[in-house]
Amino acid sequence: MASHILVQATLLPDTNIARDNIVNTWHFETASTPPSAGELMAVQTALHAFYTSLGVKLADAFLNGSVRYKFYNEADAPPRRPIVDNTAGGITLNGNNLLPPELCMVASYHAAFVSGTNPARRRNRVYLGPFTVDGLASTGKWSNTLVNDVKGYLDTLLAASDASSDYTWETKSTVAGTYAPVIGGWVDNAPDIQRRRGVPATFRSEFS
């Protein structure tokens, strides 16, 4: 019997201030109920491989190269406590100039679409960043290189899920309360804004 697991992956900031955390939420189904330690570690290994690959695009002027993984069993009554709380490091980051941290790339992923079901309920997304200036094209959009590289990292994450007997990467519909295996997705070159990731001003120049 399977378990549905929510993973909160937090890219930790240089400041060590919680408001600067970069948080992504992922959903997985594990093979066992309750999930085994080995199954949860397999999920973490796949996610950390994704963030390690992505790290070469992320800014070391803001992040410290570690990700905190909190695992929640969705069968538990809310408010849920994490069943596992691990931090993994070793991510090599990009040393070029930082773009505003609130500037994100949207990665959308989806389950198989089903007739009679709203497609939006079969689709989830994560907001990736913060990136450096070399990820931005002269058009003000993400560069084709960045888009294609991130797509490749997501391909690898999906391939790991498809090959695993321990877990399956899945979507969750909060409205319908349903889950379904991820079969694909996309990233594009339109930047998105997550205002809660913005940083406070440190300098002000007045005029009169």
Image (cartoon, helix red, strand yellow):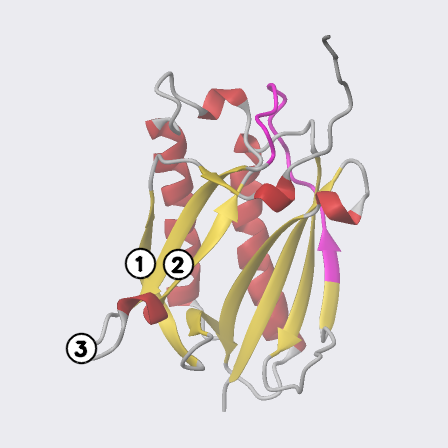
Q: Which one is earlier in the sequence, the residue at label 2 or at label 1? A: 2
Residue at disc 2, secondary structure = helix
Residue type, label 2? Leu
Residue stretch in magenta: 86-101
- Say whether marks 2 and 1 touch (CB < 8 Å): yes
Q: Which one is earlier in the sequence, the residue at label 3 or at label 1? A: 3
Distance of label 2 from label 3 (alpha carbons)? 24 Å
- Please, which residue is most extreme toward the front here? 208
Q: Position of residue 169 (x, y in %)?
A: 44, 67
For the stretch drawn in magenta, what is the main secondary structure? loop
Foreground: disc 3 or disc 1 = 3
Q: Residue beneath label 1, please?
A: 184
Q: Is residue 37 left or right of residue 104?
A: right
Image: 153 above or below 38: above
Residue type, label 3? Ser
Distance of label 3 from label 1 (alpha carbons)? 18 Å
Q: Position of residue 125 (x, y in %)?
A: 44, 56
Residue type, label 1? Gly
Q: Residue at x 55, y 44 (%)?
A: 194
Disc number at residue 94? none
Q: Residues within 10 Å of mark 1 (few under 14, many from 20)?
A: some
Q: Residue at x 74, y 12 (%)?
A: 205
Q: Residue beneath label 2, please?
A: 158
Q: Position of residue 130 (x, y in %)?
A: 58, 35
Residue 42: image quadrant is bottom right
Q: Residue beneath label 3, please?
A: 115
Distance of label 2 from label 1 (alpha carbons)? 8 Å
Residue at disc 1, secondary structure = strand
